[in-house]
Amino acid sequence: MKILWVTNTVFPDLAIALGQRPPVVGGWMYGLAKSLSHSPNIELFVATARDAKSDDEKKINNITYFHLMGEKSINEYDVSLEKKWISIVEKVNPDVVHIHGTEYAHGLSLMNACPQLNYVISIQGLISVYSRYFLANLSNSDLRKSLSLRDILKRQTLKQEEKEFLKRGESIEKKYLVKTKHVIGRTQWDYAHTKIVNPNVQYHFCNESLRDSFYESPLWEPKQDHVEPTIFLSQASRPLKGLHQVLKAAYLLKDSYPNLKLRIAGGNIVKSDNLKQKLSISGYGKYIRGLISQYGLDNQIVFTGPLDEAGMIKEYTNASMFVCPSSIENSPNSLGEAQLLGVPVIASYVGGVADMVTHEETGLLYRFEEVEMLAISIKRLIEDKELAIHLSKNGHKEAKKRHDRQANLDQLLSIYKSIV
C-alpha cells in the first residue's frame, strides 16, 4: 500500500538534508512515520510546501520526501502547486492521501488537482473554531494598551490575527472538511465540529503517538515544593495559550508562595533590552510584560527558549506541575507528554481536554475564566503531595494506554485499509 502524507512541517531528516534547522514542533508525527515506513507492504511518502526554497525529492531512512516551492504563503491558496501535485501523484500513485491538519492551503490544492484520490484528514486544531477564543478574554482596553509599533507596521494586531484565523477557517479549513469523505479524530469535540460542517463525513477514531524520548525517559518524582514550587508551560506566544491567566493566578498566590516560579518553553516574548527588541515586541508580548510588572513577578518568570525533546523532558520532570491554561484546545500533545512522564497536570476545561483529563483522577480541571480556581488548584498540588502522586500515577497509566504506539499504528493501518 502506498501512503502519501501531506504535512505542515518539514520533517527533521529532510530539514537536516536541506541544511535547515530541524523543527521543534510536530514531533508526534515523526515516530509514527518511522513505524509506518517499516510496516510490511507499506511505502510512505511525505510532502510539504512549508519553508521550501526549491523543489526537492529525497529518500531518507525508508521515507520519500517531496518539498514543494510555491508562489504564495501556505496560508493562501496557491494554484501553482496544482501541476506539481499532479506530477507527484503520477509518480507515486498513492492508495491513500493522509492530510495532517487543516490550517494551511497546500493540501487543498492537491485535493482540487486530484479529486479522484482516497483522502483522509487528521484533525489537529480547528482554526475556524479557535478564532472564537483567540483573544482569550482580553478586553478592548487590554487590546488598546497592548498595541505595539511592530503590530501596527506589520498589520498584525491581535484583532487582525483573530480575523486572519477566521478567514483561513472559512476559506481553507471548511473546504477541506466539505471535500473529504474521511477524517481521523480523537475527541468528542473534534467529532462534533467536523460532523456539523460535513454530516456525511466518515469519522475514524485514532489516538496520537508521541515523540520517542517520552516513552524512554525516567518518570517525574515529587519535589520539595515549599522551597521553590515550579510551574511549567509548554508555550505562550498567543493569547489563546493563556499565559496571562497563569500570571493572574500566580499573583493571587504571591503572598503564600513568594518563590513560585513559572518556566515557559519558547522564545522570550517580553524581552525589550535594546531598541531592536523594543521595536519587534508583539502586542501580546507587550501586554504580558505589563502584567509581569504590574504584579511584581519579574523574578519569577523564565522563558527557556526553544527546546528539543531532551530539553522539554528536563523541564517537565524538574517542575512541580504542568499547566495547560489555553482558552481552546483539541487534545494538546504537551498535556499527553506531561501525563506520560507522570507529571501532575492542571488544565482548563476547554475543547477536547476533558477526553484527556478526568478531574481529581488524572489531573485537575478548571474553567479558563476562573483564575481563582486555577490558583487553588496550584496551591493544592504544592501542599498535598499525596494528591500530586495520585494524579501522577493515574495520569501516567492513562497516557500509556492512550499513546500506545503499536495500538495507534495498528488502528491507523486499519483505517487506511478500510478507506481503500
Image (cartoon, grey):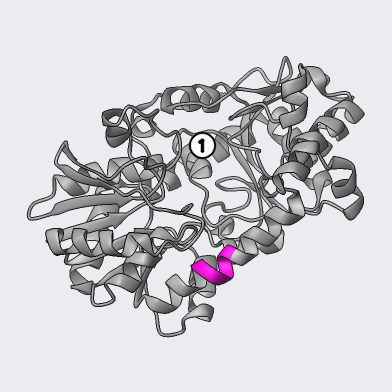
Question: What SS does tag 1 mark?
Answer: helix
Residue 381 seen anywhere in this rendered image of the structure: yes
x then y, percent, for residue 383: 73, 28
Residue visible at 14% across and 41% down? 62
- Count residues near mark 1 (Cα–Cα under 10 Å), then give few for <14, some for 14-19, many for 20+: many
Residue visible at 40% across and 46% down? 50
Q: Using the image as rendered, state which of residue 185 and residue 30 is in the foreground.
A: 30
Q: Using the image as rendered, state which of residue 393 and residue 243 is in the foreground.
A: 243
Secondary structure mostly seen in magenta is: helix
Q: Using the image as rendered, state which of residue 198 and residue 114 is in the foreground.
A: 114
Kind of residue sitting beneath label 1: Ala
Q: According to the image, label 1 marks what residue?
A: 338
x then y, percent, for residue 412: 26, 59
**How many numbered circles are shown?**
1
**Quadrant location, the N terminus:** bottom left
Task: Check the image and name the residue furthest to the left.
Answer: 41
x then y, percent, for residue 139: 87, 53
Q: Indicate left or right for 302 with 306 as reference.
A: right
Residue visible at 30% across and 61% down? 98
* Position of 208 relative to 12 (above/below): below
x then y, percent, for residue 379: 76, 33
The segment highlighted magenta reads 168-172
Residue 399 located within the stretch drawn in magenta: no
Q: Indicate left or right for 385 with 16 as reference.
A: right
